[in-house]
Image: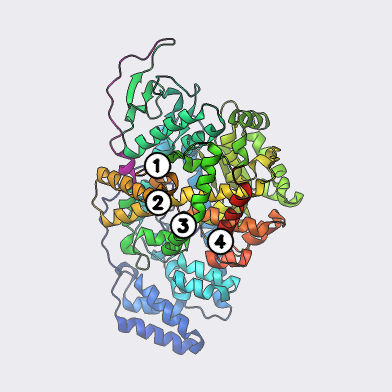
Amino acid sequence: MIISGILLPLTFHAAPGDTPGSTAVNPAPTDLPAESVRAVVEQLVEQYGANEEARIGRCVPRAAASWRAEDGTAEEFSAFCLEQFQPDDGSLDKMADRFELITEQIGGHLHEMGRLLREPLDLDQGPIMPLDLLAARLNLGNHLQDDLFANKVAFAVLLNLPVYTLDEMIEMGPGWNRREWARARMAQVFAERLPSEVSREISQAFLESDHYISNYNIRMDRLLSGENQRPFPEGLRLITHWGIRDELKSQYSEPDGLAKQRLITTVMERIVRQEIPAKVIDNADLLWAPESNQVFSLPAEGQAPAEPVAVEPEADERYAQLLKVFHAVRLADQWSPDQPTFIKRRFERYRQIPEKEVASLLVSILSSPEAAMVGQLVSSRLGRPLEPFDIWYNGFAPRGSHREEDLDRLVRERYPDVAAFQADLPVILGQLGFSKEDAAFLAGKIVVDASRGVGHASGAERREDSAHLRTRVGAKGMDFKGYNIAVHEFGHNVEQVLTLNRIDHTMLQGVPNTAFTEAFAFIFQDRDLELLGVTDEDPNVKHLKALDNFWSVYEIGGVALVDMGVWHWMYDNPDAAPAQLREATTSIARDVWNRYYAPVFGSRDEILLGVYSHMIDAGLYLPDYPIGHIIAFQIESYMEGKNLAEEMKRMCAQGGITPDAWMRGATGSPISTEPLLAATKKAVQAVGGK
């Protein structure tokens, strides 16, 4: 639920500031006498009867648990409860409706102001000024939760609406009506009470890491091969990891691509080990030979590089950034009695799938016999033994058979600027099956912006606002990478508009977790070539899509396990230094590789699984990607032969209920890897060595 991301402090984009972890926060909730709390329960039950006893018996102690000395005495708590409790005779509905309206408007306006303050950092608007960084540090909602507790609005909600655990929602949710679901989400807004200084520390840590990653570009045009050649074209500057990974993928269709892929792999390994020279990051004035790790000054045109210059490695800055995030989110642990670690909050509160279930889904793919079958097929299609970077093999995807430069030319002609893509949104929606009226409405609620970073989708949080689509658009127009990202983000935006503007309760805005919005983004992205009018005549296109999806889950599933392992290691070693975290991360990456990839690839102790930038700036976000692919394939399988637009509208109307309930309502089945595994097995048999 998006509003909880404002009232609760898990804010992924705020501002750089002082080093997190320095705030000492120790105030404990008031120890209200147990007899006082029991007396309040008894009085309310006597006043409102046995029908309200269960709700009273649950809600009063929960409200008492968040009551602090500054909130009042035991007598004042009792008086508050007797005044504010609402019976379920229509009064409770009125209170809930009012709170729903308040949260939509407050949260929505704060979100819009935050988006405005961050625009210079997020959008390609020229150099970032010092003032821009200061303005982005403003978190205007930072004290909102404090204020809502201080003026007792939060207590009114906790007093009247139960806070349910994930297990309870999974068990009871299928029997709830829409209003009961909305009520459950309202109480979760105040499931923890964080001091504003803790919220601020978390916000600052995430923005600092986001800023670090957003500016982590590799000057590909300044890379030197082992023969001191510069294999990449002038001006090629790519963000890590997204850009360099996608460049590696694009080289499968190039005759000299193998050498470039090996060079990119070395770049990635240098980043993970933090052997990359700090001064070559986003620096056009230096040449870098990743294989020898030597650096040279940029020579005059026609001259060879001079003697190497002395440079220092990045000095574990990558892992220092991750530790800042870790220490910041740990400050919230003592204020989250139901989920006392960030790991539990990420899985149980925000992802709403238990960690063991997520791990089980991932392992069912990684350890499946289909992995070896597909690996053999990839090797056969490449005509060589697998190399570690072939986890990013994209030859199953239709775009894998098209040259990147041809696709770039096609996209630039169609979308020379942001305005051209904006104008084409209704056309794209029409191609996807949306009616003319729906297409006009959806396109009218989405604004396209030129992104400074790789791109992202920013949804609205009140119905009067618009969602924003951000993607990179170069001086020559949008290239295929930017278009591919734009189509992906467009899937997010359409979901965001449908689950805000076409839903019955705004407290149920959104989807159960990020994996579901990723699923719709993947469904859109999978149609990128089709939307361009580029067709593939291969009769096995359906099987190839299954193989492509499986290989994507196989790759990112291991990355997700590394992310999960690193967070458990940090909790086990909270005082670790950046260098120790680096060693642990590379060790975990090697262990995951050796267990799930070495049997397929034949090589051991590889560390490429540790290169993903999400690990640094997104806080256990990576498991959403493989789960998103699994969900997307399951939804795609269900949608086969049906209208995508109509099914998407129906599914999105469910909103932010639990993942299990959502998937059962959407497809009739729980989340499962079986559809993907079965389709992959058939695909291998059908495609064979073709």
Going by the numbered disc 1, the residue's amino acid type is: Leu
Q: Amino acid at mark 4?
A: Glu
- Give the structural element (helix, strand or loop) at label 2: loop
**Mark sitting earlier along the chain (3/4):** 3
- Disc 4 target residue: 674
Determine whether the residue tagged by mark 3 lies in a helix, strand or loop: helix
Q: Secondary structure at mark 1?
A: helix
Instruction: Specify the quadrant that holds the C terminus.
Output: top right
Q: Residue at x 44, y 36 (%)?
A: 240
Question: Residue type at mark 2?
Answer: Gly
**Mark 1 vs mark 2, CA separation in Å:** 19 Å
Q: Is 317 on the left-hand or right-hand side of 659?
A: left
Tell me the SS state at disc 4.
Answer: helix
Whether 316 is among the magenta residues is yes
Residue at mark 1 to residue at mark 4: CA–CA distance: 28 Å
- Name the residue nearer the viewer: 55 or 388: 388
- Label 1 CA crowd tier, 10 Å (few <14, some 14–19, many 20+): many
Check disc 1 and report the residue beneath it: 608
Place of residue 405 in the rendered image (x, y in percent of width and height, measured from the top left): 60, 28
In the image, which residues are magenta? 302-322
192, above or below 371, in the image: below
Nearest to N terminus: mark 4 or mark 2: 2
At horizontal 68% and vertical 40% (from top left) the residue drawn is 536
Question: Which of the numbered marks, if any, corresponds to residue 362?
Answer: 3
Q: Is residue 510 visible?
A: no
How far apart are the two marked residues, 4 and 2, measured between alpha carbons? Answer: 29 Å
For the image, the number of numbered tags is: 4
